[in-house]
């Protein structure tokens, strides 16, 4: 074991040293790292006279690294690479329409990993030689799971996403503010362990200038705009109340009956909290999409936020006034969890946690591609260790930790990004711990997932706007989910959902 | 001879068929299919999509909302556009400059301008509330409260499209004959009397045209909703086009979205025909 480690370190060192010639030619990397898809190995392939078509997201998130690595791939192999950038709202249909109409429009696609159930019939699984590569073996358990469907890896991992809590460490760890909080509430100011504690602290720090910059600060920045990924924020709030570690067989549906669980008390409690949380958001916060959430927390406006890495990365930008003043922690838990088997709330001494592995960019090669060899080589090159280490450090690229090294090593962020050691520690520890959990929640991922999610977002939004009570809203969603399942075929949805349950129940 | 004349028409007819008729006929066919994210066969399911639509309260509510929002927008655009056209119709310093200035909003890209408006109306960081704050006015929940959000969408629509109304009405004013004005002046009519007895009646045909063109455009209200509110809060600003977009392109319910689109098209054709007739009777009858 020790010998292997030594050999790997030597290889990495040797690779970096040898990579200097490559980093001169391609300054985005620090140096090449030897491997089957390294700069050197890729340069030995020739795809002259051939064209690779790629569809990806708009610049910069995922679109920019796609284009960057496409250009590098062209230079190395002589291939011509066409990259089509599509805004997020159009990405699904831009991919799905050619699939359904039998057009062979793209060889490679970058898309949301939760669409796996929709795209699965049209994807070419990576050949075993790619699956066995060290860079692929380095992908963590969560993201191998995300890339797999019906026991087969069909997506090529390029990103790892999840929701976690982001907080202002200069507030939570501030002894003066801790004393004030204790005096006022009788409780200890700490990183919130439950959503109720989150709400209490957010309320305390809402509406006054606690950072002394002359502007009011607020409690919580969240993604609340209806069709702007709000469904993920909502599920984060619901997960600890509704994902019982001892109750297997489904979080969104009861797998046996395919009855939606979204109107059960755990879900309704999560929505009640979400509705209440609007009081602690900045003005207009209940219309924040992901962009506003990033800039609100990342700009120092709120004490808390929870979603993907973006707001954290924004806060840690070199020019940020709150650089190194933030921390990461697991999503708050719940001290009671709905047990759908007994029909009762179960009290938990230690808060129940349910890490939510949501979304994440992924990539795949189309089954009908006539350039599968080149397509897999491109993806492998895209995610090679040299490119990956460099992409991880560019916040706007949207590429977040999903591989063991260097992603979860705090020293990497301290050395390469200049983060404070404590910040890097909370970040890597929080993200790394999610892989260890046995009570994880994943996206629904079944065919027609967008129909289920837009229906849920509409219901939740009605409750947030007080057009309906939380229970009425979720009853409406459950009714619509039953109709969607009937329309799409209960057996098809059950078979697909079994893949999600298999990921969650271990 | 007759045959060769018909042959000359053929390219035009074919282009018409390809561009207008084919997509329409295809949409009609798709609306009777279950084309969805998982079922992409062009099967025939009779009127199931239409039956589902009848029960879809969200669609009907979005239609009612659209009617209200577009009627208010177009009415405001008409009043403002007419006022601006009257302003630069008269002798005014820098008349040419103002004419160009008033046309600028129409020449900008709607989506980009709506993004700018969203920034202006941002409740904690936008300049609108900041300026109100300087005047001692409490912040307005522009986009996060149902009524204010609908008003914000209307505001953006009015800002963008008043120019169009201005352009049509100014062209109308410039084409009016001089004699009726001279006669009104001889009769001692003041500006208000001249407006209501001479200008307004003579502008009736232009008014009807401008209102109908804008109503057709406003009935497709989508960009501003998409960028500003995404139909929220709740469903407070969800219009039919936005709802059809959600069902069709987000949910990928192509068959169902086609049935919604066709129904919406028929409703619009019928209602706008009625509106045109009513306006014609009301305005042209008077003139």
Image (cartoon, rainbow, N blue to C red):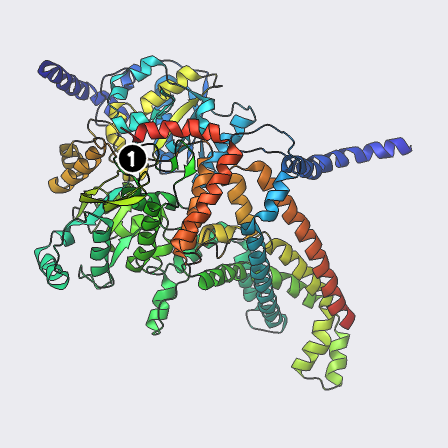
Locate residue A250: give its quadrant. top left
Above or below residue B36? Residue B195 is below
State the SS at label 1: loop
Q: Is residue A320 left or right of residue A90?
A: left
Q: Is residue B66 left or right of residue A485?
A: right
Above or below residue B266? Residue B212 is below
- Count the marks: how many? 1
Locate residue A139: give its quadrant. top left
> Who's the residue at 44% across and 44% down the image?
A478
Q: Is residue B112 visible?
A: yes
Q: Nearer the viewer, residue A142 or A275?
A: A275
Q: Is residue A49 left or right of residue A396?
A: right
User: Which quadrant is the C terminus of chain A positioned in?
Assistant: top left
Q: Whole-percent x and y of residue B36?
A: 54, 33
Q: Which chain letter goes with mark 1?
A: A
Q: Is residue A68 visible?
A: no
Locate residue A152: give its quadrant. top left
Q: Whole-percent x and y of residue A270?
A: 32, 49
Q: Nearer the viewer, residue A180 or B195?
A: A180
Q: Nearer the viewer, residue A279 or A411?
A: A279
Identify the residue under disc 1.
A247
């Amino acid at each position: 074991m020790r010998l292997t480690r030594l050999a790997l370190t030597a290889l990495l060192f040797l690779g970096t040293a040898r990579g200097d010639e490559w980093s001169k030619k391609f300054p985005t990397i620090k140096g090449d790292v030897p491997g089957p898809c390294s700069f050197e190995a890729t340069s030995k392939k020739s795809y002259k006279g051939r064209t690779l078509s790629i569809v990806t997201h708009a610049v910069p998130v995922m679109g920019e690294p796609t284009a960057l690595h496409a250009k590098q791939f062209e230079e190395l192999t002589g291939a011509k690479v066409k990259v089509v950038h599509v805004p997020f709202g159009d990405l699904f249909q831009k991919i799905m329409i050619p699939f359904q109409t039998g057009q062979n429009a793209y060889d490679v696609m970058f898309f949301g990993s939760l669409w796996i159930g929709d795209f699965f019939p049209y994807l070419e699984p990576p050949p075993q030689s790619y699956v066995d590569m060290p860079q692929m073996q380095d992908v963590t358990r969560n993201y191998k799971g995300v890339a797999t469907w019906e026991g087969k890896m069909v997506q090529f991992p390029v990103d790892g996403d999840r929701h976690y809590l982001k907080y202002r460490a200069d507030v939570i760890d501030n002894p003066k503010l801790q004393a004030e909080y204790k005096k006022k509430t009788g409780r200890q100011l700490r990183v919130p362990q439950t959503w109720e504690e989150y709400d209490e602290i957010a309320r305390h720090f809402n509406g006054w200038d606690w950072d002394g910059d002359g502007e009011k600060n607020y409690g919580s920045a969240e993604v609340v705009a209806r069709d702007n990924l709000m469904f993920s924020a909502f599920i984060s709030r619901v997960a600890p109340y509704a994902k019982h570690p001892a109750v297997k067989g489904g979080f969104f549906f009861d797998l046996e009956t395919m009855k939606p669980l979204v109107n059960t008390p755990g879900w309704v409690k999560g929505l009640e909290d979400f509705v209440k949380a609007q009081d602690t958001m900045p003005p207009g916060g209940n219309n924040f999409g992901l962009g506003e959430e990033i800039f609100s927390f990342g700009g120092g406006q709120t004490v808390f936020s929870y979603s993907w890495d973006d707001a954290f990365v924004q806060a840690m930008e070199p020019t940020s006034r709150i650089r190194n003043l933030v921390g990461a922690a697991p999503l708050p838990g719940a001290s009671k969890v709905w047990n759908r088997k007994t029909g009762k709330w179960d009290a938990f001494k230690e808060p129940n946690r349910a890490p939510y592995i949501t979304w994440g960019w992924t990539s795949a090669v189309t089954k009908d591609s006539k350039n599968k060899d080149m397509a897999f080589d491109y993806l492998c090159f895209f995610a090679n260790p040299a490119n990956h280490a460099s992409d991880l450090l560019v916040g706007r690229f949207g590429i977040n930790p999903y591989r063991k090294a260097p992603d979860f090593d705090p020293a990497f962020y301290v050395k390469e990004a200049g983060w404070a050691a404590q910040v890097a520690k909370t970040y890597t520890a929080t993200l790394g711990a999610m892989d260890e959990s046995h009570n994880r929640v994943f996206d629904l991922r079944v065919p027609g997932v967008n129909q289920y999610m837009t229906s849920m977002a509409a219901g939740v939004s009605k409750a947030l706007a007080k057009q309906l009570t939380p229970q009425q809203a979720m009853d409406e969603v459950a009714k619509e989910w039953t109709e969607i399942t009937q329309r799409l075929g209960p057996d098809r949805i059950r078979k697909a959902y079994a893949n999600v349950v298999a990921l969650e129940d271990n | 001879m007759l045959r060769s004349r018909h042959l000359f028409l053929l390219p035009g007819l074919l282009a018409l068929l390809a561009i207008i008729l084919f997509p329409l006929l295809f949409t009609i066919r798709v609306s009777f299919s279950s084309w969805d994210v998982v079922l992409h066969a062009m099967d025939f399911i009779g009127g199931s999509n239409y039956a589902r639509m009848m029960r879809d309260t969200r669609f009907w509510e979005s239609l009612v909302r659209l009617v209200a929002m577009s009627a208010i927008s177009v009415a405001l655009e008409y009043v403002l556009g007419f006022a601006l056209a009257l302003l630069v119709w008269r002798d005014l310093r820098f008349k040419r400059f103002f004419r160009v200035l008033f046309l600028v909003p129409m020449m900008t890209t709607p989506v980009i301008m709506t993004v700018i408006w969203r920034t202006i109306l941002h409740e904690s960081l936008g300049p609108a509330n900041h300026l109100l704050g300087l005047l001692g006015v409490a912040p307005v929940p522009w986009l996060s409260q149902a009524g204010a959000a609908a008003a914000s969408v209307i505001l953006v629509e009015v800002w963008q499209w008043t120019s169009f109304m201005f352009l049509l009405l100014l062209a109308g004013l410039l084409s009016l004959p001089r004699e009726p004005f001279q006669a009104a002046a001889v009769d001692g009519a003041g500006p208000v009397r001249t407006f209501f007895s001479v200008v307004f009646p003579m502008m009736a045909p232009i008014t009807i045209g401008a209102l109908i063109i804008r109503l057709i455009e406003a009935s497709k209200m989508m960009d501003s909703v998409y960028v500003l509110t995404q139909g929220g809060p709740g469903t407070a600003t969800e219009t039919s086009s936005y709802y059809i977009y959600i069902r069709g392109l987000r949910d990928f319910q192509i068959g169902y979205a086609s049935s919604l689109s066709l129904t919406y098209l028929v409703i619009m054709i019928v209602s706008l025909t009625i509106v045109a007739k009513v306006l014609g009777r009301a305005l042209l009858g008077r003139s």
